[in-house]
Image (cartoon, grey):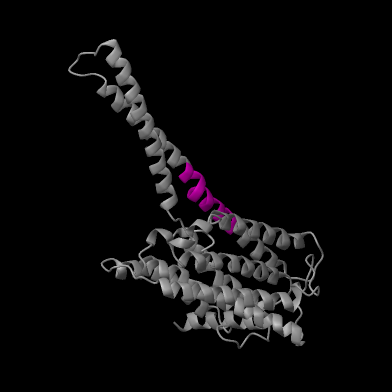
């Protein structure tokens, strides 16, 4: 055990040697292990403990809680976006091509440092997205993408606040907080009830919006591999590869949630039509005898109408089933 502690102490010494002294003693910043434990605890809670506890319980009705939570997230994300923006990105003081980290104690610089920490802290508040799914027994929404996305982010952002709380990498926080303003606004409207549902046709575009975000982050980060800029290349790779990973995960989710479901609905409609046609053909034969031509003609017309009606109804049912499904947007 003492050998392990020696390695841990040595690890902390290396971290402190290269860390930003301004954030070293801030809450959760002295060591990465508390953040790592919180992330692992989150995964265990939403994938193992939570579903087990809720297995024989009725789902909680959390409508008012979710309205309050989503409203809080909209306001919190707006404030973070404003703080990061007014610390450099929206004032013209930051360059999109190359922005080194300023380690001075100027008020505007410290404002960005504090905004970076609050952005890190916001990743923990987002854990409640999944916790609410578990309490409402919406376990199908607790997808691998959802858990990876929320479980990785606090640990990823921790390193940025520890070593580079400012400069080029904060563009990611600016863009991501703006996406969250839109995303939690959607969730807030959805929580208000079914009367708002007709106005939420843009749900699937949230996932596309997030993928555009990751492309912008990739381009913004990886450009420093070809530009001489006083910014750590390790963080260029760290941020850029995170964006690549999440882009492909969200892209796969988008295809599964929308493209494949649309195809399944079409297949269901075709299957219903085939079943209806087969039933009508079977009804045209009675006791092995065929009716006279006139009766056959009339019967055929009636059956064709029945088949058409069944097809339309079947298609309508398939479409309604597709619309009633509410897949998790990545966004979540």
Residue 287 in picture, x, y percent from top left: 17, 17
Residue at image coords 28%, 68% = 58
Which stretch did the figure color magenta?
Answer: 246-262
Residue 284 or residue 215, whichever sits in front: 284
Residue 251 is one of the magenta-drawn residues: yes
Residue 198 in picture, x, y percent from top left: 50, 56
Rendered view: 250 above or below 300: below
Rendered view: 290 above or below 223: above
Residue at image coords 19%, 15% = 288
Left or right: 266, with 211 as reference point: left
Residue at image coords 58%, 55% = 205
Left or right: 173, with 202 as reference point: right
Left or right: 318, with 242 as reference point: left
Residue at image coords 49%, 62% = 196
Q: Quadrant of the N terminus?
A: bottom left
Residue 332 or residue 106, whichever sits in front: 332
């Amino acid at each position: 055990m003492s050998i392990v502690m020696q390695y841990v102490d040595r690890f902390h010494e290396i971290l402190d040697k290269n860390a930003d002294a301004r954030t070293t003693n801030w809450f959760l910043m002295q060591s990465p292990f508390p953040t790592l434990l919180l992330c692992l605890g989150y995964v265990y809670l939403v994938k193992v403990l939570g579903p087990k506890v809720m297995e024989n319980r009725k789902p909680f009705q959390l409508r008012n809680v979710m309205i309050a939570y989503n409203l809080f997230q909209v306001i919190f994300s707006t404030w973070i976006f404003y703080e990061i923006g007014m610390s450099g990105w929206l004032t013209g003081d930051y360059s999109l091509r190359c922005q080194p980290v300023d380690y001075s104690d100027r008020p505007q610089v410290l404002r960005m440092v504090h905004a970076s920490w609050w952005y890190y802290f916001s990743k923990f508040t987002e854990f409640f997205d999944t916790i609410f799914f578990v309490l409402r027994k919406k376990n199908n929404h607790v997808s691998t993408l959802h858990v990876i996305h929320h479980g990785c982010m606090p640990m990823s952002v921790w390193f940025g606040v520890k070593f580079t709380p400012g400069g080029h990498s904060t563009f990611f926080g600016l863009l991501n907080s703006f996406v969250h303003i839109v995303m939690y606004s959607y969730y807030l409207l959805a929580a208000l009830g079914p009367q708002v549902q007709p106005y939420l046709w843009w749900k699937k575009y949230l996932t596309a919006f997030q993928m555009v975000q990751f492309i912008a982050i990739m381009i913004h980060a990886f450009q420093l591999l070809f530009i001489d800029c006083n910014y750590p290349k390790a963080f260029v790779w760290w941020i850029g590869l995170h964006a690549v990973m999440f882009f492909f995960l969200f892209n796969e989710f988008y295809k599964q949630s929308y493209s494949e479901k649309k195809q399944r609905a079409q297949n269901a409609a075709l299957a219903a039509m085939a079943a209806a046609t087969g039933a009508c053909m079977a009804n045209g034969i009675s006791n092995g005898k065929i009716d006279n031509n006139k009766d056959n003609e009339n019967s055929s017309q009636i059956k064709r109408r029945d088949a058409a009606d069944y097809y339309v109804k079947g298609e309508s049912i398939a479409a309604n089933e597709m619309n009633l499904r509410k897949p998790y947007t990545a966004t979540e």
